[in-house]
Image (cartoon, rainbow, N blue to C red):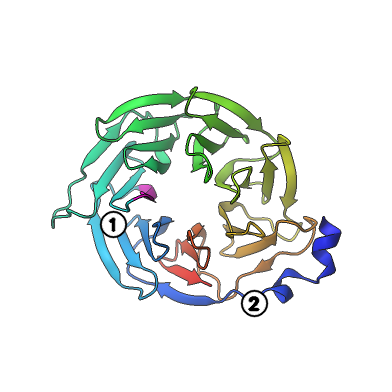
Amino acid sequence: MGAVAASKGPLREIRKPIKMRRTLKGHFGKVYAMHWASDSQSLVSASQDGKLIIWDAYTTNKTNAIPLRSSWVMTCAFEQSKGNLIACGGLDNVCSIYNIQNQSANARATKELVAHDGYLSCCRFTDEGHIITSSGDSSCIYWDINSGEVLKTFSDHTGDVMSVAISPENSNVFVSGSVDKTAKIWDLRNGKCVQTHVGHENDINSVAFFSDGNGFGTGSDDSTCRLFDMRSYGEVNKFGNEKITSGITSVAFSRSGRLMFGGYDDFSTYVWDTLADSSQAAYALPTQHENRVSCLGVNVKGDALCTGSWDTNLKIWA
């Protein structure tokens, strides 16, 4: 497969180059998280200036800003079916849900989900009524948003759970990545871990599903991104080289799955060819951030990538 991928020449010469198209300026603190809405144009970002900002990525306008009770926010999420709800959480151990349709000036959370004993590292909606959260208490929780009740707790990890992603093909299946160096696949229907994937030599900071739902990618402090296939129950590719020594904070795939994006502690965003031999050089996006890239995501249409950084800015690439 690597030979086939390499036969057409380096990836950057095959496809048109990815360029920076927009910069979103407005946060006064480090940007820690971002998430696209299902319309592929709006996105939410969370910063330790204590604000959630909803942006129009095309015009760069801010369409909404939500002041948070706790400024130590680590994650944010957009509900994908209707786009009315936004969730966030962090060192307050609480997942706060906001309805952006009926926002008043003093913006109270419509629901606060309290059960975790550690910081909230990641949250993702499965639908308008349910959300999955991951935490530093080594567990993930599946919630009923309307009642605020815990429906299921997933506690097989032995270290802080840093990231969750929901399968694009089946919302009953999700993957989590942890400081215990493993990624686990879970099934909401039986409440159990159905697969455990090993291979990383250090904390897994980020997980993202492959576009067909059969595989997923991980990014780790061991300076590698990896691609796992759930059908063969194993690692199918590993992306890294001796020149790249910094950890990975976040990963995402292009819509086709050919490209894997990684945000790195050394301020770079690298693009890997998922078909190629892993030793092939990645190409770094030009005009990099001035601090750690803390989050990134590709929109649903697949025509834009957003990166967020500790330099307080977000950048849109296409």
**Going by the image, does 237 lie left or right of 316?**
right
Spot occupied by residue 211 in the image (x, y as percentages of width and height) = 59, 51
Location of mark 2 (residue): 16
Give the magenta-colored segment's residue range.
Answer: 73-81
Mark 2 crowd level (few <14, some 14–19, many ≥20, 10 Å Cα)? few
Spot occupied by residue 155 in the image (x, y as percentages of width and height) = 49, 24
- Spatial distance from mark 2 to mark 1, Cα to Cα? 35 Å
Spot occupied by residue 174 in the image (x, y as percentages of width and height) = 52, 37
For residue 187, the mark is none
Location of mark 1 (residue): 51
**Going by the image, does 13 lie left or right of 103?**
right
> Label 1 sits on what residue type?
Lys
Residue 52: which quarter of the image?
A: bottom left
Q: Is residue 245 visible?
A: yes
* Cβ–Cβ under 8 Å for marks 2 and 1: no
144 over 25 or under it: above or below: above
Q: Is residue 220 visible?
A: no
230 over 272 or under it: above or below: above
219 over 148 or under it: above or below: below
